[in-house]
Image (spheres, rainbow, N blue to C red):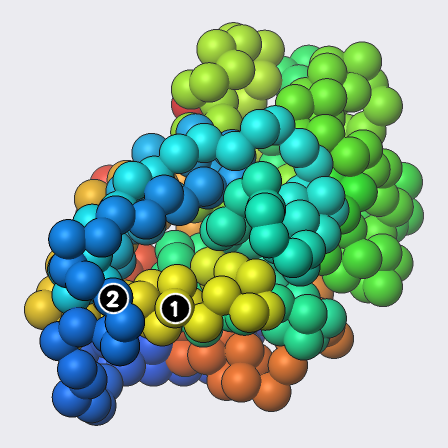
């Protein structure tokens, strides 16, 4: 038991060391370069309708961050956020690449080399890097399947299946690490598949899972209390490859929110509860490799985990893992 505890501690330390000082980045980032108060050819009285992918629009946290970034840049004119039609993630990203008119302008999704090549990314992790920390949503009567799992080998040897979206980078990351993955193109359908025992664990980001279960309102869906699946994974805002005005506005807005502390307050408001309730520092960490991040995103990811290390170090010692929402 002592050897296992030491290995768990070493794994956690390696994961902490991997990401490094994003908190310092938020506090000490370089001053914003001076920019013209009104972008060329744009009147402050202009209003732009920005259509946000429906999954992001339906998330209070993501919608609030979009509004925060846009509100920091009044020189770009007024804005109005609207909800896109419902579409799977793959189609949403394809729509962003199309010429006008588009059915959406903006999506917040996990990054990858391919996505950063095809679209314009705003390289600030919208949840501070929490997306790469995943816990298992399981059926309550299936909790025993996870008892004693202490490594990726245990996960593989037991044949435990993890559900993920067909177009999510997470599915490929899990697969290249030897994990058995079951996919579907629609997020909502994955919960139905979990209930029907099509897989054992729906791996959800720490920044997502409490909101997910609040929406589902199913007492048989619980959070497995002992495991933390961890890999470098960052979620960015993405816009179309020619939509430089929106990309610049979001980047400037995020820069200003970091500088004035409102981004830090945003992270605390929307994700602080998850860090406490899920007690990440008390979980068995299963470390996975992510070979699909570009150099810049890998560096940002390295910094982001230090933020989480600091945040988790501030948790009250009385916090205990939970299995329900």
The residue wearing badge 2 is 42
Q: Is residue 209 visible?
A: no
User: Where 290 falls versus 263 (above or below)?
Assistant: below
Q: Indicate the quadrant containing the N terminus: top left, top right, bottom left or bottom right.
A: bottom right
Q: How many marks?
A: 2
| Residue at x 52% of width, y 33% of height | 84
Residue 303 in the image: x percent, y percent?
Answer: 41, 79
Point out residue 179 in the picture as x, y percentages from the top left corner. Answer: 84, 52
Check the image and name the residue furthest to the front: 41
Question: Relative to residue 42, is residue 58 drawn left or right?
Answer: right
Question: Does 97 appear above or below 300?
Answer: above
Q: Position of residue 307 (x, y in %)?
A: 32, 69
Question: Is residue 195 rendered to the left or right of residue 50?
Answer: right
Please name whichever residue, 117 or 214, is drawn nearer the observer in this view of the structure: 117
Of callouts 1 and 2, the N-terminal one: 2
Q: Are marks 1 and 2 in contact (CB under 8 Å)?
A: yes
Q: CA distance from mark 1 to mark 2?
A: 10 Å
In this picture, residue 193 sits left or right of residue 73: right
Determine which residue is flagged by label 1: 245
Is residue 182 something one can see in this rendering?
Answer: yes
- The image shows residue 90 at horizontal and vertical percentages of 73, 46
The residue that appears at 45% across and 41% down in the rendered structure is 51
Q: Residue at x 53, y 85 (%)?
A: 296
């Amino acid at each position: 038991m002592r050897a296992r505890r030491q290995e768990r501690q070493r794994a956690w330390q390696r994961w902490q060391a991997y990401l490094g000082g994003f908190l310092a980045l938020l506090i000490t980032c370089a001053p914003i370069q001076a920019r013209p108060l009104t972008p060329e050819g744009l009147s402050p009285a202009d209003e732009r309708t920005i259509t946000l992918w429906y999954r992001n629009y339906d998330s209070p946290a993501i919608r609030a961050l979009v509004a925060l970034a846009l509100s920091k840049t009044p020189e770009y004119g007024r804005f109005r956020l609207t909800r896109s039609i419902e579409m799977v993630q793959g189609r949403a990203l394809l729509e962003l690449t199309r010429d006008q008119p588009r059915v959406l302008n903006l999506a917040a999704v996990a990054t990858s080399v391919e996505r950063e090549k095809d679209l314009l990314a705003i390289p600030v992790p919208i949840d501070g890097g929490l997306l790469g920390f995943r816990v298992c949503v399981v059926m309550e009567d299936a909790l025993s399947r996870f008892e004693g799992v202490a490594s990726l080998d245990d996960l593989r040897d037991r044949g435990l299946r993890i559900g993920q979206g067909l177009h999510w980078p997470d599915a490929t990351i899990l697969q290249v690490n030897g994990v058995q993955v079951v996919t579907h193109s629609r997020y909502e359908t994955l919960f139905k598949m979990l209930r029907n025992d099509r897989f054992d664990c729906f791996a959800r980001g720490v920044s997502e899972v409490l909101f997910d279960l609040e929406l589902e309102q199913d007492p048989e869906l619980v959070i497995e209390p002992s495991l933390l699946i961890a890999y470098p994974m960052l979620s960015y805002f993405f816009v179309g490859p020619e939509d430089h005005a929106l990309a610049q506005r979001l980047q400037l807005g995020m820069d200003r929110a970091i500088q004035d502390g409102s981004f830090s307050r945003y992270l605390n408001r929307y994700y602080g509860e998850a860090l406490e309730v899920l007690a990440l520092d008390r979980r068995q960490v299963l470390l996975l490799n992510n070979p699909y991040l570009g150099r810049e995103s890998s560096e940002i990811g390295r910094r982001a985990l230090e933020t989480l290390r600091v945040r988790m170090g501030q948790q009250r010692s009385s916090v205990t893992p939970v299995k329900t929402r």
